[in-house]
Amino acid sequence: MMASQATKFPVMVTQRLRLRQFEPKDDKGLHACLGNQELVQYWDFAPCRNIQETRGWVRALAKGAQPETAIAWAVVDIKTDECIGMVNYHHREAYSRKLEIGYILRAEYHGQGLMTEAVRKIMTHCIVELKTRRIAAIIHPDNAPSIRLATRLDFALEGGPLRDYWRVGDRFISPMVYSFIAS
């Protein structure tokens, strides 16, 4: 019984969102994010070329929680259960009490404070449940909306650019490091 409880996917609810495990029905909502060149231009991979490619991501993300290293949540509208984005933590190092976060939201939902709501909830989970002290966000210097979100959540610019840190196709991206330190 203890092992199944330890691997149970952590579902969270905010005022307008549910953060839950990915399901096959999330393919169209996630494709509106991962298939959108404008939205993924600052990520470390090229946009998904078609819905089948996104379905591969959904299958991989739906496999469940691996809390020792990474978890990705489907960000869904609490009223419709429609996937509108994703938030995750990755590169977790439990001993050092640190991890990185990432997030993406469908374009038509921008400017409503939804990702602030989702990321704040994940940060609280990471700090309280995982005893995380340091949360980092690796952000391209041209990604103004992501920088605004991070600074709104009290992340501080720590350094960078990390020269040629991400490879996307034939080009390299040099992002900045923002961090939040829990007290």
Image (cartoon, rainbow, N blue to C red):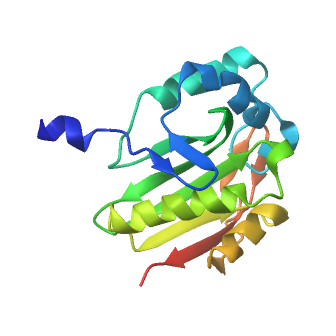
- Residue at the farthest left position: 1
Q: Is residue 105 above or below residue 140?
A: above
Q: Is residue 98 above or below residue 26?
A: below
- What percent of the width, then of the height, locates residue 169? 76, 36
- What percent of the width, then of the height, locates residue 158? 62, 80
Q: Quadrant of the C terminus?
A: bottom left
Residue in the image at 45% along x and 44% along y: 71
Between 17 and 142, the one nearer to me in the picture: 17
In the image, taking residue 123 as reference, residue 175 lies left or right, namely: right
Q: Is residue 57 above or below residue 71?
A: above
Q: Quadrant of the N terminus?
A: top left
User: Taking the image as drawn, is residue 138 in sight?
Assistant: yes
Residue in the image at 59% along x and 59% along y: 119
- What percent of the width, then of the height, locates residue 41? 81, 46
In the image, taking residue 55 as reference, residue 29 lies left or right, namely: right
Q: Is residue 139 above or below residue 53?
A: below
Between 159 and 33, the one nearer to me in the picture: 33
User: Taking the image as drawn, is residue 41 in sight?
Assistant: no
Between 153 and 101, the one nearer to me in the picture: 153
- Residue at the farthest top position: 52
Q: Toward which corner of the image does residue 35 lie, by quadrant?
A: top right
Residue in the image at 80% along x and 67% along y: 141
